[in-house]
Amino acid sequence: MSDSNIDDGRGRGVVLVGYRGTGKSTVGRVLAGRTGRAFVEVDECIVARAGKTIRAIFEEDGEPAFRDIEEAVVRDLTANHPGAVLGTGGGTILRESNRRMLRAFGLVAWLRADVAELARRLEADAITRETRPSLTNKGAVEEIAEVLAYRTPFYEEVADLIVEAQGAGPDEVAGRILERWPCS
Ligand code: S3P
């Protein structure tokens, strides 16, 4: 994990990273509501820009095309919404350029949960089956275990703080981030 020193030329925003199902969108809305900051989301902007769902982008254009749009969106959102709460997709941290832009934007909070909890949450979420493309074509638990293990070093690298999303509601998670967000 990186040092949390945002007086080193980094911005005043806050960024939420973490696997699918860790509650980034819900926590982002709570944070924005409690601070009066704007909440902007990478996935939402990707869908608006592409004019189709994320599942359709994956199916019709492939994951590399999705990642290219994602990177362009990270560039635009971080440039145009300084000081905002920025919600990322679970894989936004994969590209080094994205990690650099996210850290330059502000404090990066990693919402973490274990494989069983993520599987339970995603299973319970009807929207997941409709909108979230499979990343590996494996079963849910196997996919989460494999992808999370691969991504964990990237989450660790980009994060200023780790917040356990497990067993905590969105208000509690937001509260822990606010303790560390100096501009709040
Ligand atoms: C992805 C996570 C999704 C979305 C896309 C890819 C991933 O975002 O960006 O389906 O690679 O983990 P959420 O984490 O908001 O579901």
Image (cartoon, helix red, strand yellow):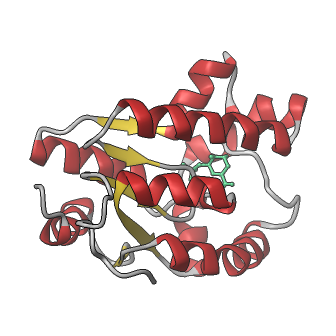
Query: Relative to the observer, which residue lies in front, 142 or 175?
Result: 175
Front residue of 150 and 22: 150
Residue 56 x, y percent position in the rendering: 78, 29
Q: Quadrant of the C terminus?
A: bottom left
Q: Is residue 103 above or below residue 164?
A: above
Residue at 81% over, 67% down: 139
- State how many labels appear: 0
| Residue 65 position (above or below residue 183) | above
- The reply, left or right, for residue 181 in relation to residue 92 is left
Q: Which residue occupies the foreground of this view, 2 or 135? A: 2
- Is 150 situated left or right of 15 in this image? right
- Residue 163: image quadrant is bottom left
Residue at 53%, 51% (x, y): give it. 125
Rendered location of residue 16, percent (x, y) = 40, 58
Residue shown at 47% from the left, 61% from the top: 17
Q: Residue furthest front?
A: 9
Task: State the image quarter where residue 69 is shown.
Answer: top right
Q: Can residue 3 be seen in the rendering of this structure?
A: yes
Residue 53 at what x, y percent from top left? 68, 27
Confirm whether residue 20 shows in the render.
Answer: no
Question: Residue shown at 61%/47% (left/top)?
Answer: 128
Q: Position of residue 109 (x, y in %)?
A: 37, 67
